[in-house]
Image (spheres, rainbow, N blue to C red):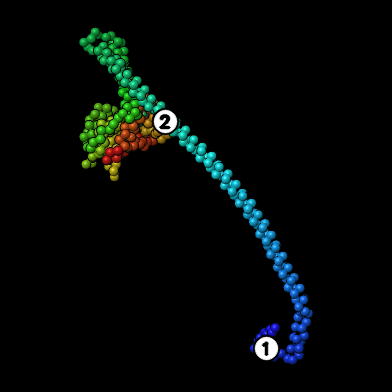
Amino acid sequence: MRMSRRVPANAPAPTPERLAEFRTELGRIAPANLLDELTVQNGQLVAALDEVRSQRDELAVLNDELAETNRGVLALYNQLTEELEETNRGVVALYAELDEKSAQLRAASESKSRFLANVSHELRAPVTAIIGLGRLLSDSSSDPLTAEQARQVGLIRSSAQDLLGLVNELLDLAKAESGRIEPDWEDVDLRPVFGQLRGTLRALATRPGVELVVEEPAAPALLRTDEVLLGQVLRNLLHNGLKFTERGEVRLRAEQRDDRWNFQVSDTGPGIAPELHDRIFEEFYQVPGTTRVGGTGLGLPYARRLVTLLGGTLELASEQGRGSTFTVSLPAGGA
Ligand code: ADP
C-alpha cells in the first residue's frame, strides 16, 4: 500500500536526515503483524456490537413505555366515551322530562283559560241583572227611596259595574290566551283610527292639568293589521296614562321605520321602577300605591297578548318619577 501527503509549496525540502527520521517513526507505529491488526479490528467490532445492543435495549425500553402510554390513552378514551354516553343518556332523559313538563304546563294553562272563560261568562248575566235592578230601584218612576237607601243602591250599582268590568276583562284575556281571537287582517289607515281615539278618550281626560295629545301620523299611514285589536291596545295604554298622570301630558305618536310601525304612548306620570317592568305585565299585578285609581291589573297582560297576536311587541321604558313610554312595534305588512 502506498500513502502520500503533499507538503506546502513553500515548505523547505526535507533533508535526508529528516526523511530517515520519518521512516523510523513510521516503522515504529506500523503493526507488528496482521494478527495484531485483526485483534484490534475485532475489538472495535465487539465495541460496535455492544453499542448496537445497548441501543436495541434502549429502543425496547422506549417501546415498552410507548405501549404503556398507549394503553393509558386507550383507557382514558374508553372512560371519556363512557362518561359522554352517560351524559348523553342524562340529556335525553332531561329532554323527555322537559317535554312532559311543558305538555303539563300547556294543559294547565288551557284549563285555566277555560275555567276563566266559563266563570266570567257565567258571571256576566247575574252581574248585568244586578246593575239593571239597581237602575230600576233608583229610577224616578219607582217608589221613592230614602237618602240612605239611594246611597246604598248607588254603592251596589257602582260595585256591580266594577265587577262587570273585571268579568269582561277576564273574559277578553281568557279568549286571547286560548287562541280564540283571530285577527281580522286588513289595510288600515291610521289617521281615522287616531281620530276616533282622540274623540273617545277626550271624555276620560278630565284632569285640568293633564293634556291628551294624539299626534296626526304622517301620510300615507297604512298598515296591515286588525283595526279593532290595535284600537283596543292603544286605548288601553292611553287610558292607563290618563289614569296615573296627575300633571303634564299623555301623548300618542306613531312612525314608520323600515318595515315596522312604532306606536309610542308616553306620559309624564309617576313612572315605574325598572325592577317592576316585567311584573306589571303579569295578570292582576298592580304597583303598590296605585290601586286607589281603580283597575284590575289585567289591562297590560291583555294588551301584550293582543300585540303578540298581531305579530308585534309591547315594551316599556320608564323610571320612577320620570314618566313612562309604552312602545308597540308592529310589522307594517301584518304578521
Ligand atoms: P290596571 O291599570 O287595570 O291596574 P294594568 O295591567 O293596565 O292594570 O296595569 C298594571 C299596573 O301597572 C297598574 O296597576 C299600575 O300600577 C302600573 N301602570 C300601568 N300603566 C302605568 C302608567 N302609565 N304609569 C304608571 N304606572 C302604570
Compared across the picture, whether 3 is left or right of 334 comes to right
User: What x and y, as percent, mark residue 240?
Assistant: 32, 30
Whether residue 281 can be seen here: yes
Which quarter is ligand 1 in?
A: top left
User: What x and y, as percent, mark residue 224?
Assistant: 25, 38
Above or below, 165 against 248 in this view is above
Q: Amino acid at mark 2?
A: Ala
Q: Say what secondary structure mark 1 lies in.
A: loop
Residue 221 picture quarter: top left
Q: Amino acid at mark 1?
A: Ala
**How far apart, in angstroms, are the residues tagged by discs 1 and 2?**
108 Å
Seen from the viewer's position, the closer of residues 32 and 288 is 32
**Residues packed near mark 1 inside 10 Å, few (<14), some (14 to 19) or many (20 plus):** few
Above or below, 82 against 166 in this view is below
Compared across the picture, whether 7 is left or right of 104 comes to right
Q: Residue at x 72, y 65 (%)?
A: 50
Seen from the viewer's position, the closer of residues 55 and 223 is 55
Q: Residue at x 32, y 24 (%)?
A: 171
**Residues packed near mark 2 inside 10 Å, few (<14), some (14 to 19) or many (20 plus):** few
Instruction: Report the number of numbered marks.
Output: 2
Q: Can you identify the residue that label 1 sits on?
A: 11
Above or below, 201 against 335 in this view is above
User: What x and y, as percent, mark residue 246?
Assistant: 32, 29
Q: Can you identify the residue that label 2 sits on?
A: 103
User: What x and y, as percent, mark residue 225?
Assistant: 26, 36
